[in-house]
Image (cartoon, helix red, strand yellow):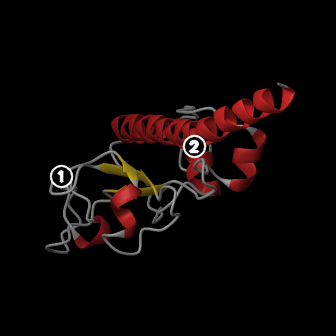
Amino acid sequence: ELLVVIVIISILIGLMLPVLSHVRETTRKTAARDTVGQLVVCWKSYLNDYRCFPDESLTEMDLLAVSILAGSNYNHKGFAYMEFTAEQMTNGLVDPWGNRYQIALDNGVSPRDDTGAYDGKVTPFGAEVRRPVLVWSKGPDKSDVDAEARKDDLRNWREGE
């Protein structure tokens, strides 16, 4: 009888492991999606307060980008748009898979001409998107090299926008 109970318990555990793995991955995706949304709101708030983005070419949530949103560096008003842990202030803001969140900010340079006019467009991966701020996580595969690798990215825009 004890052997039968052990076999039944092992079968149940075997059935539950894939479910738990799926739940864990879904939780990571949800956390990344929430952070992406928060970062978009923070960068838009920065844009509303300063009427432009920092002159620096920011491409990821590294130490400089984190310090800007925390209230220093290119933030002379000292507004804290987001709170960060000490680790995030040291290493940058990373997604649940260990990569820094990626950002694209409309820095006032139009891709069609060199007027420097703010046009409200960003061109990630060579495709023009009509948004002043784009934020994304590279997702579970930790890559966004080509269109196939970007399918699992968590981002604040849809393809074709």
Residue 86's x, y, as percent? 77, 41
Q: Residue 130 carries which label?
A: 1
Residue 151's x, y, as percent? 34, 60
**Spatial CA span between label 1 and label 2:** 40 Å
Is 6 in front, or is 12?
6
Is 20 in front, or is 142?
20
Residue lying at 60% horizontally and 47% vertically, measured from the top left: 96
Q: What residue type is labelled 1?
A: Arg
Quadrant hosting residue 64? bottom right
Compared with residue 13, is residue 143 higher up or lower down, i.e. above or below? below
Compared with residue 131, is residue 58 higher up or lower down, i.e. above or below? below
Q: Which mark is residue 18?
A: 2
Callout in the foreground (1, 2): 2
Residue lying at 59% horizontally and 38% vertically, measured from the top left: 15
Residue 71's x, y, as percent? 60, 38
Residue lying at 63% horizontally and 47% vertically, measured from the top left: 67
Crowd tier of the residue under label 2, counting other residues whose Cα lies within 10 Å: few below 14, some 14–19, many 20 or above: few
